[in-house]
Image: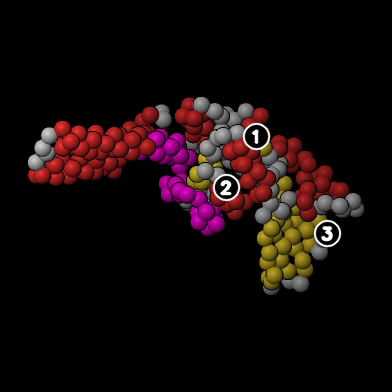
Amino acid sequence: ADLRDFTSTPGVGVTALVGGHLVAVGAPARLLDGNDDTGSARAAEVAAGLEDGGRTAVLVLRDSVPVGVLGIADRLRPDATATVAALTTLTGSTPILVTGDNPRAAARLAAEAGITGDEVHAGLLPQDKVEAVRRLEARGRKVLVIGDGVNDAPALAAAHTGIAMGRAGSDLALETADAVIVRDELTTVPTVVSLSRAARRLVVQNLVIAAVFISGLVVWDLMGHLPLPLGVLGHEGSTVIVGLNGLRLLRDAAWNGAAQDMR
């Protein structure tokens, strides 16, 4: 069939002209907003039944008339529970789920992943996710957002750090995020966080090493006579030590050690 004028509205759905008919596919609550005819009421009833069963309902309209309702069940990633537990241990707080899915489907997945009900925020539009990030930042928190969809892109941009899942991620999410997990394994996220903390400790170590060497050379020169060759050797030697110390993060042992800490 001929398809024209395709448009996508984040958090609502998509529309297009298919064979001369206007077809819309998206969230029932938003596509049926204001409609009270018999067909719309029946579609809303079917959608509610699917959502009560923990599924995400998707409504199909043709020329503003409901013609079908799809029930989509999200499957929890095998490593989601372990990732939530690792991040909880690492940060001292339970991760928060922000999603555009209906509350019942979101609550079911959150429970399986080990996220408590108070930390589940469902039925959110992209701008609502951004607002959730800003509320957390207003409390003085550094917010890390993990996402892969178009609707996650604004929150990824608003967060202190945004991480996109590479294999399943949309182009917009990949371009917006600060980092991309190429392996597409959730368990990589806490490992990356742990490794980044190790990198920060290493930076502090290097600053201390450089400060000690330079301070020692300055004090030596002020209190006596510092031979030029010895001064050059001390200065360049500190640079070499700092560089070698930083190179430790490039070893496989650094990654393996960070991953081991998360188990």
Residue 112 position within the rendered picture, expressed as x and y whole percent measured from the top left: 59, 31
C-alpha gap between disc 3 and disc 2: 38 Å
C-alpha gap between disc 3 and disc 1: 33 Å
- The residue lying at 73 percent from left, 69 percent from top is 17
Q: List the residue tagged with mark 2.
A: 158
- Mark 2: give few (<14), some (14-19) or many (20+) Cα within 10 Å: many
Residue 125 visible from this viewpoint: yes
Segment colored magenta: 170-199
Q: Nearer the viewer, residue 217 or 94?
A: 217
Residue 144 position within the rendered picture, expressed as x and y whole percent measured from the top left: 52, 40
Q: Give yes or no for contact between labels 2 and 1 (Cβ–Cβ under 8 Å).
A: no
Instruction: Return the mark for residue 97.
Output: none
Q: Which amino acid lies under the numbered mark 2 shown in the image of this protein? A: Ala
Say whether disc 3 or disc 1 marks the residue closer to the N-terminus: 3
Instruction: Identify the secondary structure beneath mark 1.
Output: strand
Residue 197, magenta (yes or no)? yes
Main SS of the magenta part reads: helix
Q: List the residue tagged with mark 1.
A: 120
Res 7 → quadrant: bottom right
Kindly report which numbered mark, 3 or 1, lies closer to the viewer in this rendering: 1
Res 22 → quadrant: bottom right
* Horizontal side, residue 71 vs residue 152: left or right: right
Residue 13 position within the rendered picture, expressed as x and y whole percent measured from the top left: 70, 56
Instruction: Quadrant for the C terminus, please.
Output: top left
Taking the view exactly as shown, the residue that stands out farthest to the front is 223
Q: Which amino acid lies under the numbered mark 3 shown in the image of this protein? A: Val
Say whether disc 3 or disc 2 marks the residue closer to the N-terminus: 3
- The residue lying at 43 percent from left, 49 percent from top is 182
Q: Nearer the viewer, residue 180 or 21?
A: 180
Residue 226 position within the rendered picture, expressed as x and y whole percent measured from the top left: 11, 39
Q: List the residue tagged with mark 3.
A: 65
